[in-house]
């Protein structure tokens, strides 16, 4: 399949692939990411796609599997929504006081957890970017984020009970 033929294939099949991804993920942004990832993978093997009897079926299966992997990863690495939980505990505190308290708690974390938590929630970096900067695997970044979030939440709740 030539590059031009692949572009035509991608334009024609994109909407169907998005529908499949959205139906699984229930999130338009994640669905878009999945479709982009699948199209990139298919582009890399476009010369072998010609041998398949139904390239769109191959694309749909790839979208389905990739979307399911995203869901599986989300279950493996659940994110904790700090702000909602923490703000519910201390409704009378000012935002800046709460923020400063969170920063003090973050300062007590192990260095790797501190780094990834600050990069993700303060600097707004994506997990893949963090992994590249700190030279960790994406899974290791998720694991450190999860541990850091749990620690911060536990320490914050201990402070509220005092």
Image: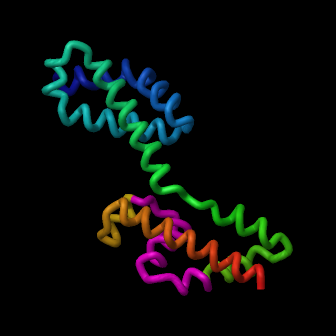
Quarter of the figure with the C terminus? bottom right
Q: Quadrant of residue 52?
A: top left
> Where does residue 161 sit, x and y in percent of width and height?
77, 80
- Residue 152 appears anywhere in the view: yes
From which residue to which does the magenta span run? 104-127
Question: Which residue is at 39% across, 42% downward?
Answer: 69
State yes or no: residue 120 in magenta: yes
Judge left or right: residue 94 versus residue 124: right
Q: Quadrant of residue 17?
A: top left
> Where does residue 77 sit, x and y in percent of width and height?
47, 56
Question: Which residue is at 49% across, 25% downward?
Answer: 19
Q: Is residue 26 above or below residue 148?
A: above
> Where does residue 62 sit, x and y in percent of width and height?
32, 30
The single residue placed furthest to the right in the displayed view is 92
> Where does residue 24 sit, x and y in percent of width and height?
50, 32
Nearer the observer, 110 or 32: 110
Judge left or right: residue 84 versus residue 120: right
Question: Which residue is at 49% across, 50% downward?
Answer: 75
Q: Is residue 17 above or below residue 148?
A: above
Colour treatment of the image = rainbow
Q: Is residue 3 above or below residue 99?
A: above
Q: Is residue 158 above or below residue 145?
A: below
State yes or no: residue 112 in magenta: yes
- Residue 8 appears anywhere in the view: no
Question: Which residue is at 37% across, 37% downward?
Answer: 66
């Amino acid at each position: 399949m030539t590059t031009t033929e692949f572009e035509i294939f991608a334009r024609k099949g994109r909407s169907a692939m998005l529908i499949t991804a959205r139906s699984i993920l229930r999130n338009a942004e994640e669905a878009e990411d999945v479709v982009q990832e699948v199209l990139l993978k298919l582009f890399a093997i476009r010369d072998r796609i010609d041998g398949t009897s139904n390239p769109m079926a191959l694309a749909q299966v790839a979208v389905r599997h990739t979307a399911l992997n995203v869901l599986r990863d989300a279950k493996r690495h659940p994110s904790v929504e700090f702000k909602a939980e923490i703000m519910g505990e201390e409704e009378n505190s000012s935002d800046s006081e709460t923020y400063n308290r969170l920063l003090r708690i973050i300062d007590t974390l192990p260095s790797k957890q501190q780094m990834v938590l600050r990069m993700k929630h303060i600097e707004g970096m994506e997990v893949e970017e963090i992994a590249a900067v700190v030279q960790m695997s994406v899974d290791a970044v998720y694991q450190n984020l999860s541990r850091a979030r749990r620690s911060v939440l536990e320490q914050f709740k201990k402070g509220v009970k005092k």
